[in-house]
Image (cartoon, rainbow, N blue to C red):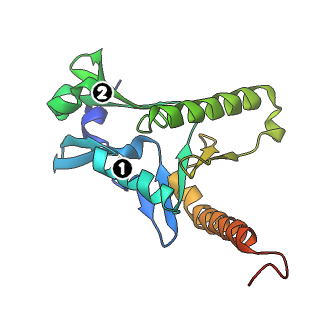
């Protein structure tokens, strides 16, 4: 491992959640690790998104009808850091890999309530198994699971997709999901002719 790279190269500081008019997109990946630059060669881990209030806000907005799409990949992702870059309260999230380095791992959905995380894990395991046995040509680049109990949508994407490549399609996806939900709502409120008084 290049020790110098662990200290000076950090991912883009784009936020892990993007709110729009009708909902949000959450990147459940390394962008959840929130860094701040202290100097040209020194970084400090600030937090791992979401904090308890951020988590509560996402779950509440989803329950209240916002369309929330969580992008997940089929495996945990890790990033290395120097031990002195990690605040004490986050040291429990780090694994020692030697020479003063630690590894911070972000697992898909590890911030969700246990029952939701269990359903997400089942979805990811099923997708991983399906993709493992399907010919390359028949592997869909993405698949979606709607957890109706929380109103969260989980979008499983191939690891080859980058955030920048997905951004234009995500707005279209959220708009489509909002449209589908409002069509279902309109259908549910329609009454047979003659039933209105």
Does 134 sit above or below residue 58? Answer: above
- Which quarter of the picture shows residue 182? bottom right
Left or right: 122 with respect to 92?
Answer: right
Image location (x, y in percent) of residue 12: 36, 52
Decide which of tag 2 and tag 1 comes sooner along the chain.
Answer: 1
> For the image shown, how many numbered marks are present on the structure?
2
Between 150 and 124, the one lying in front of the other is 150
The kind of secondary structure element at disc 1 is helix
Image location (x, y in percent) of residue 146: 64, 48
Image location (x, y in percent) of residue 136: 79, 35
Mark whose residue sits in front, 2 or 1: 1
The residue that mark 2 highlights is: 93
Q: What residue is drawn where x is 78% and y is 75%?
A: 191
Disc number for residue 56: 1
- Which quarter of the picture shows residue 171? bottom right
Q: Is the N terminus in the top left, top right, bottom left or bottom right quadrant?
A: top left
User: Is disc 2 surrounded by few (<14), some (14 to 19) or many (20+) residues within 10 Å?
Assistant: some
């Amino acid at each position: 491992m290049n020790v110098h790279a662990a200290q000076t190269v950090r991912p883009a500081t784009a936020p892990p959640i993007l709110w729009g008019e009708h909902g949000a997109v959450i990147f459940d990946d390394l962008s959840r690790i929130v860094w701040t630059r202290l100097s040209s060669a020194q970084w400090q881990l600030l937090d791992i998104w979401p904090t308890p209030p951020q988590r509560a806000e996402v779950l509440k907005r989803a329950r209240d009808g916002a369309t929330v799409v969580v992008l997940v990949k089929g495996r945990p992702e890790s990033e290395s850091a120097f031990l002195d870059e990690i605040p004490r309260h986050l040291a429990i999230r780090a694994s020692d890999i030697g020479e003063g380095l630690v590894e911070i791992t972000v697992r898909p959905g590890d911030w969700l309530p246990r029952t939701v995380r269990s359903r997400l894990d089942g979805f990811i395991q099923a997708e991983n198994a399906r993709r493992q046995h399907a010919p390359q040509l028949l592997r869909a680049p993405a698949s979606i699971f709607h957890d109706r109990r929380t109103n969260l949508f989980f979008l499983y994407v191939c690891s080859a997709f980058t955030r920048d490549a997905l951004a234009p399609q995500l707005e279209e996806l959220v708009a489509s999901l909002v449209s589908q939900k409002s069509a279902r709502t309109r259908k549910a409120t329609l009454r047979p002719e003659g039933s209105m008084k």
